[in-house]
Image: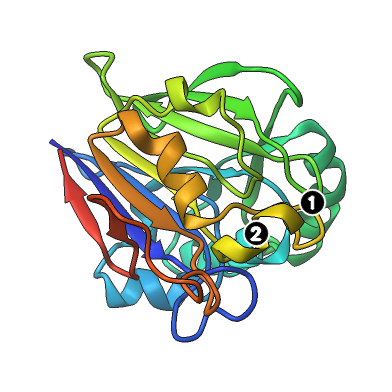
Amino acid sequence: MVEVRLLGSGSGVLAGRRSQSMVLVRDDGGRGLLIDAGQPLQRRLYEEAVDPRVIDAVIITHIHADHIMGLPGLLFEIDALGATESPLIFLGERSLLTAKPMLEAFKPRRLALRVESVPDGRIHNFEAAGFRVETFPVRHSLPTFGVRVFDRRGRCILFYSSDTVYLEHLKDLAECEVGIHEATIPEGMASEAEERGFHSTPSQALEVLEKSRYKVLYHISEYSFRDGYPEGEYMVSFDGLSLRL
């Protein structure tokens, strides 16, 4: 069994009561892969009764604050619980140049930092926390990649768009058990997607997710559904949403 749990579901601003982006993927042995580390990560792990030490790897899709600022707190949390090294942290090549000095500055002194880079601008595969992970480029206001996660049988269990404008070619990549796509801006702003931070509308997200078994709209702002809810079968994400596969 694999669990996909949304620790956070909100956008970077105007998210209301929602926490920021953070998705935990766990196998039946309890090992964890964390995709993005928004805030308040420490509190959300406590509220969901997740031991921070089960997180073997962290993937940061880009370095906007709502996707990375929970990471320093996680490092201090596991240090306080007796860990001697960090989870394996994956960042894009250009993101790493910016983020590594920050992590070195804010990490606990005794904790060994483990960081690996992900190539920018192309599909890349690697192993993390017992899963096969595939990253792929998307289009946002700074270098960003989306993520697919595969179980031991080769089944695609998760498609995660990260922050991006609508990209039609992602439809084939989203043929997975769980499809999570950002839906930050309302329908009336579709033509202004780049001016509004390079984001997607709910209906654009659902177009990408047409081949996903479970369709989850994510990175929700207070304006996401200002112009109404699109038709179809899907879930609007909320903090704590858990899918077991």
Foreground residue among 219 and 2: 219
Please provide percent x and percent y for residue 20: 52, 69
Q: Residues within 10 Å of mark 1 (few under 14, many from 20)?
A: some
Residue at 58% in and 67% down: 70
Q: Residues within 10 Å of mark 2 (few under 14, many from 20)?
A: many
Residue at 55% in and 61% down: 187
Please provide percent x and percent y for residue 180: 40, 46
Amino acid tagged 2 = Ile
Residue that carries the numbered disc 2 in the rendered image: 68
Please provide percent x and percent y for residue 125: 54, 16
Foreground residue among 144 and 216: 216
Left or right, 106 with respect to 24, comes to right
Q: Earlier in the sequence, mark 2 or mark 1?
A: 2
The answer to whether residue 185 is visible is no
Residue at 34% in and 70% down: 239
Asked if 240 appears above or below 118 in the picture, the reply is below
Foreground residue among 205 and 238: 205
Q: Kindly identify which numbered label has been placed on residue 99.
A: 1
Is the C-beta separation of discs 2 and 1 under 8 Å? Answer: yes
Amino acid tagged 1 = Ala
Residue at 47% in and 56% down: 202
Q: Kindly identify which numbered label has been placed on residue 143.
A: none
Quadrant position of the C terminus in the picture: top left
Element assignment for label 1: helix
Please provide percent x and percent y for residue 235: 27, 57
Based on the displayed image, in which of its 4 quarters is residue 195 positioned?
bottom right
The answer to whether residue 207 is visible is yes
Q: CA distance from mark 2 to mark 1?
A: 9 Å
Left or right, 230 with respect to 203, comes to left
